[in-house]
Amino acid sequence: MKHSFHFFIFFIFFGISCTQKKTGPKPISNHKDSLQAYFSLANDFDLPPDEREQYILKALYIISPQENDSLHRVNLFKIANRYYNLENWKEYNKIVHLVLKKSEMKQDAFSIAKGNTYLGDYYDSQSMPDSSFLYYDNAEKKYIGLNDNYNLAKTIIKKAILQFNQSDLLGSEKAVFKVLKIIKDTENNDVLYDAYNHLGLIYNELEDYNNAMVYLNKALTSIDDELTASFSQPKATSYNNIGLVYQNKKDFKKAKSFFQKGLEEENVAKDKPSLYAMLLDNLGHAKFKLNEKDSLPDLFFQSLKIRDSLQLTTGIIASKLNLSEYFISKKDTVKARQFATEALELSQNINNYRNILNSLKQLSVIEPQNAAVYSKEYILVNEKLQKSERKIGNKFSRIEFETEEVKEKNSNLTTKNRNLLYALLSFVVFGLLLYIVKTQKNKNKVLIYKQRQQKANEDIYNLMISQQSTIETGRVKEKKRVAQELHDGVLGRMFGLRINLDSLNKFDDTTAVEKRNNYLLELKNIEQDIREISHDLSREKSELINNFVAILNDLFEDQKKTFESKLILSIDPAIKWDLMSNSTKINLYRIIQECLQNINKYANADTINIKFKKAENNIVLEIIDDGIGFNVNRSKKGIGLQNIRSRTHECNGTVEINSKMGEGTVIAVKIALE
């Protein structure tokens, strides 16, 4: 019976770090819909479980859409805690995996370590010690990397509990002393309490009762106000464990007094119902051994009812074995057999070899006629237990070793990957530098080419200007010569003729006089016409003064002669062409030339309208045709349009190209006057 008691005691009592998750109800904010209010209500143990779960869902509804920051992850851990307190393991596991995923996304090492601890708690609750130990071990290594000694110590304590429950007492003892070394010279009384309490349980199991009492009393004296105010009920836990030591020493009177002291602790039934059930069962067993019949078997049944409601399988087995023993003393073999058989079946379901042995031992007492059968089965189970205990000591060490080995392999792999990454980065950087150098050389070549092209364009333009100037000079000379000839020759002779005719007016012949007057009037008109012609030939029209306009006129004249499209030219006389650089004029000329070429090739236009307008301090060139149009998006990469954009860009101008199929094309170039 001793082993079954101790096993269950440790599983329930020493889980302080787990029961500490029960932070208890706190004062609720006046804002009923606040997150803190939902958290508090979800942890109010006076409320029904279904109602508390509704508050968890409301809190989760608020948290879910929030940004994945540290506060968000803290709140998710709070949600997990409340599912833990409700023993809703499915949702607890789901939330823990969610917060672990979010922590890994943000590389939050602390939350990753905490998440591993929570998963260890989950697998411990599911009686999967190997998985639980693995996650605790992962958390331990994370906390070592974070230099977080407090959480490191608590995690090692959890590992020690697992080792104790799997009968690896030596490994568990080493782990606890490791914890005491870590928290030496600190004020972490909660961890100190866990460590001393656990050592007391280990030595009690080893039947070293003196050391057990030493450490259990140290645990009791280490309890401070903060630990007392928690929901872990440390004093009630210590009283129960001290009582168990006296019970193993067969001092049932002292054992009974400590169990009663544990039950007298305030709110023990509310804060830790599993502990309360254990104290009732242990008190009932002590009273039974003292032959005190009052409150029996009610204490056993009361404990069994609580354990059954909490689904504490190991505790249920202990209660049923105590009831079986009680009914044996009452000569009620039917009930004694019933409870012993039920205990055996439960023990077999969870492969708890110690309780299987206790159940078989109990049944052999109840049914002495079948004692040989039970003894044979007892021997087989005992051999399995011994083999299991021989293996168990190495199992957790193997997990630690394999985890460390995997970590070392990962470290080596990380180093290799890092070296590979460095080599790849070096290659990429070298290639990038080579590309930049080559690109820069090409850019320099392009720049030199553009400079040469620009100079060539300017030379061509200057040549055109020179040629046009020569033509204009000849034209002006010719006009002056003609004007001078008309003025000095024709007008002189005409003037003499008018004088001679005027002299004929001395004659009195009326008819002659009338004819002469008509001739004189006609000659005067001819004189005026010739004078006007002379003045027109002498005056230089403004359109021809500027050589650029003349060059454009030549281009348009060629267009009209070569193609059937009607060309309309409009030049704003307010434009001061002298303010425009030769480079800009060349680019405008080439743009018009490119547009005319595209229209002639593709547009099939009837009319081409070219306008030069002055808009504030800008000159705007518009080239409009009524041709078939084109898809601007598909033609963006065309060489002609690229040339137009490139030349506009060289003039620090802007260009808009609008065209639709069947609606013609409008090209507008806007350039600032210098």
Image: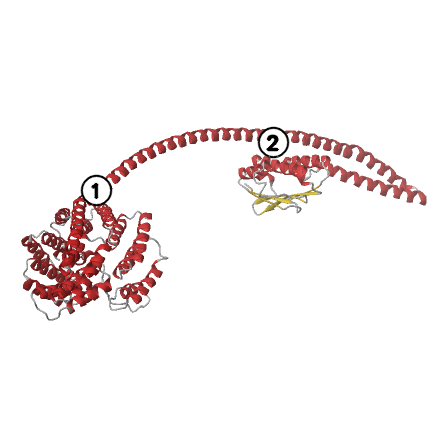
Residue sitting farthest toward the bottom:
294
Picture quadrant where residue 515 is located: top right
Element on which disc 2 rests: helix
**Is any atom of residue 231 visible in this view?**
no
Q: In the depicted view, which residue is nearer to us: 663 or 566?
A: 663
The quarter of the image holding the N terminus is: bottom left
Q: Is residue 285 left or right of residue 83?
A: left
Q: Residues within 10 Å of mark 1 (few under 14, many from 20)?
A: few
Q: Which residue is mark 1?
A: 398
Query: With respect to residue 601, does 359 lie above or below?
Result: below
> From the viewer's perspective, is 261 left or right of 455?
left
Q: Which mark is residue 349?
A: none
Q: Nearer the viewer, residue 541 or 153?
A: 153
Closer to us: 30 or 195: 195
Residues 530 and 540: in front is 540
- List x then y, in percent, for residue 458: 57, 31
* Residue 167 on image: x %, y %: 16, 50
The total of numbered circles placed on residues is 2
Q: Amino acid at mark 2?
A: Tyr
Residue that carries the numbered disc 2 in the rendered image: 461
The answer to whether residue 73 is visible is: yes
- Residue 390, by quadrant, is top left
Q: Nearer the viewer, mark 1 or mark 2?
A: 1
Q: Residue at x 18, y 65 (%)?
A: 334
User: Residue 90's spot in the image, x, y percent?
Assistant: 31, 57
Label 1 residue SS: helix
Height in image: 193 above or below 555?
below
The outermost residue toward the front is: 369
| Kind of residue indicated by mark 1 | Arg
Q: Residues within 10 Å of mark 2 (few under 14, many from 20)?
A: some
